[in-house]
Image: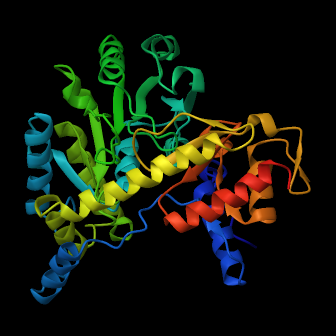
Amino acid sequence: MSLRLAERSRWVAPSATMAMAAEAARLKATGVEVFDFSLGEPDFPTPEHICQAAERAIRDGKTHYTPAAGIPELRAAVARHYATSVGLPVEPQHVIVSNGAKHSIHNALMALCGPGDEVIIPSPYWVSYAELVRLTGAEPVILETTEEESFILSPERFLAAVTPRTKLLMINSPSNPTGVVYPRSALEALADAVLKTEVGVISDEIYEELLYGDAEAHCFAGLRPGLADRTITISGVSKTYAMTGWRIGWAVAPPAVSKFMGALQSQETSNPCSISQWAALEAITGPKDAIRGMLAEFSKRRDYVIERIKGLKDVSCIPPQGAFYAFMNVERHFGRTLGGEPITDSTSFCQAALRSVNVAMVMGSAFGAEGFARVSFATSMETLERGFDALGRFVEGG
């Protein structure tokens, strides 16, 4: 008799971004040259001074268990970051260091949600949000935002969606997949709406340092008095410091929530990697020269991608203000034949592009936004140039 899977196995689908990256990797392994615009991670090495801090930690024997919620030094450094850069008074005990920001989001949802609850998620949204909500037994309530409204959730739409079952609102600025950064005025209007309800907020701010032009990121919890008492702020070192594989994220939460999250983590995973924690401490407190260099390169790529998208037939895109993604509207190609294949939706568009011209993108449907395709410009300029040449041929029907 075979093992019978639990009911929750029906609630979760594999990550579409990881699936596209895996398919691109499979093709590369067969010798195919793939222009990979699928994964969202910096293509730069982790800065040397951070790697040296990890090596020192190993030499100094810091290779054993740490407190489940993270080493005191790192929790204190994260708390100081919010106090100095945001003006948000945070105590170290309110900081829970986890195995990446995704783990932090999972812990927060497990702390607050259960069967019968609803969580409002504006679309487009990062692929894991809805799946992580479902794992708790709660129901994701997806609110569509449009390209015409710059993918920004209005307070009116939020308030209209609130029911007695609504437990949380999840927001993400700068945004994956759109690159949109909410203006302060839009966030303040949303904050005022939240304060009219009993709804809490998970604010995913993992891309807070990756900004272009005059865009500014704002910590949601600090926008209005009382918001910090009902907001869980998520961030980490993965994107800003090119440390995706080190797996260090954090949550800043109200006392009762952070206490539970720490207890939950002590049972699920124990502490995050001890060596990675010491590396993350150096990332936060050490020199920022390498970070400024990476951001300058991302900015060049972003400008290049914007211009190349303008030249693509029947494709449009809101210029990204943060993160390292461009979210292209490809809907006008539906009903056509491209690369010898019929295009009916964003999945067939991306699959045909990969099969015919070896360009790997992620379908908008994975982000709750049919009609779009996400391009990551966290790759070399040469890959962008040749990949967009190939993409240009593809949308011309070649």
Give the residue displayed 20% in from the left and 38% down from the top: 256
- Indicate left or right for 136 with 12 as reference: left
Nearer-the-camera pick, 43 or 300: 300
Question: Can you see residue 223?
Answer: yes
Q: Check the picture and name the quadrant holding the N terminus.
A: bottom right
Query: On the image, which quarter does residue 21 sit in?
Result: bottom right
Q: Is residue 206 left or right of residue 34?
A: left
Seen at 72% across and 60% down, the residue is 390
Please state which of residues 333 and 4 is positioned toward the viewer in this rendering. Answer: 333
Quadrant containing the C terminus is bottom right
- Compared across the picture, whether 327 is left or right of 214 comes to right
In this orientation, does residue 239 appear?
no
Q: Nearer the viewer, residue 227 or 81?
A: 81
> Hey, which quadrant is residue 68 in on the image?
bottom left
The spot of residue 382 in percent (x, y) is: 54, 67
Specify the color scheme. Answer: rainbow
Instruction: Residue at 28% x, 40% y: name it.
Output: 233
Q: Is residue 182 above or below residue 15?
A: above
